[in-house]
Image (cartoon, rainbow, N blue to C red):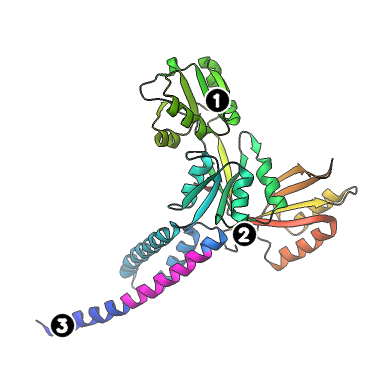
Amino acid sequence: MSNKLEKARKIINEVDSKMAELFVKRMRAAEMVYEHKKDFGLPILDQKREDEVISKNSALVEDEVLKVYYIDYMKQLMSLSRAYQYRMQSGLRVAYSGVEGAFAHIAAGRIFDGARRVGCKDFKAAYDAVVSGECDIAVLPIENSYAGEVGQTIDLIFSGNLYINGIYELEVHQNLLGIRGARPDEIKRVMSHPQALSQCHDYINMRGYETEQTSNTALAAKVVAETKDKTLGAIASAETAEIYGLEVLEANVNKSGENTTRFAVLSKVKASSPSLSNTVLMFSVKHEAGSLANAIGIIGKYGYSMTALRSRPMRRHSWQYYFYVEIEGAVNTDNGAKMLEELNEVCDKLKVAGSFAPHTEI
């Protein structure tokens, strides 16, 4: 064996020994990262952060040929770190409203892959499951592109103590489901949530189907599967069909091809992450002329652009309202602190409800 080969193998063995030690150290740090993400209700994949780490570290490699291989190495290392965190996430408990196969169930699975999803009877039950500690996180819908805001969720966020630590967009495709072997022309009656039936109104009328409302789309699919009636159909997702052993008889039967639901991730602790660049504010204004205009003016004064502004009636005060606002930018800055200080002067109640990364699709 040549001296050159012996020398090379010695160097490799020494480096591999150090790398094994550093690998364990790095994965222990990944455990800490996961615990942080669990506490704050953040997803494991943060692509922006990973890109920043790879860019920063690859700049340390001067050899342009080796830099290409180093970037591949870093990507593999990141992938292993995520896989390890996904394994730890199997113990995460995520509350959602509905039964297995509901769109909230699907959204929760896509945001927190591998986590234990806990179905609850309604939005409040899912919210309260996090408050009580039964679950770590809740995933609840806040808006649909077809039907508008989900008022019950917005009210829970305003009156409760959980924070929004992400908003995710799930494109919803409604399908006609039936038992295996059924045909669309055999269906006489379709079941689904009222909103889904409304979204598919034109298709249902064209087919001449009778309708029956259920509390959610997945429950409709479950009933159809249990009855095994060829004349009974459900309007629901393709994932739901797979769960309950049904067939997609016709796909994408909703009226609008653009049907997206935004889901909020809610947890007990407010997250702080560079990727969560937009902020949700909720406030009620003093019962004085121009008070809402003053609040909006203050937000604009400090350079924040509003992307959403909605009013909601206050439960215990007739004809009084609170407001839900989404703004571009974080408020954990000196500029944001000054804005919040001025808003407090014109608002009866002001709440920084959370933050999110804009247009995050799942």
Amino acid, disc 3: Glu
Q: Which residue is mark 3?
A: 6
Q: How many marks?
A: 3
Mark sitting earlier along the chain (1/2): 1
For mark 2, does the 10 Å Cα neighbourhood hold few (<14), some (14 to 19), or many (20 or more) residues?
some
Q: Nearer the viewer, mark 3 or mark 1?
A: 1
Camera-nearest label, 1 or 2: 2
State left or right for residue 298 relative to residue 230: right
Residue 209, image x, y percentages: 52, 17
Query: Which label lies toward us, 3 or 2?
Result: 2
Residue at 18%, 84% in the rendered image: 7
| Residue ID for mark 1 | 200
Disc 2 is placed on an element classified as loop
- Specify whether 312 is left or right of 187: right
State yes or no: discs 3 and 1 in contact (Cβ < 8 Å).
no
Residue 117 against residue 15 in the figure, above or below: above
**Which residues, given as a range, are shown in magenta?**
20-36
Magenta part, dominant SS: helix
Under tag 1, what secondary structure?
Answer: loop
Query: 144 or 92, which lies in front?
Result: 92
Displayed quadrant of residue 80: bottom left
Quadrant of residue 228 in the image?
A: top left
User: Identity of the amino acid at label 1?
Assistant: Cys
Q: Position of residue 108 (x, y in %)?
A: 50, 48
Which residue was labeled with disc 2?
A: 268
Give the residue type at disc 2: Lys
Q: Secondary structure at mark 3?
A: helix
Tell which residue pokes out farthest to the right in this image: 289
Queried whether the magenta region covers residue 24, the answer comes back as yes
Taking the image as shown, residue 156 lies to the left or right of residue 188, namely right
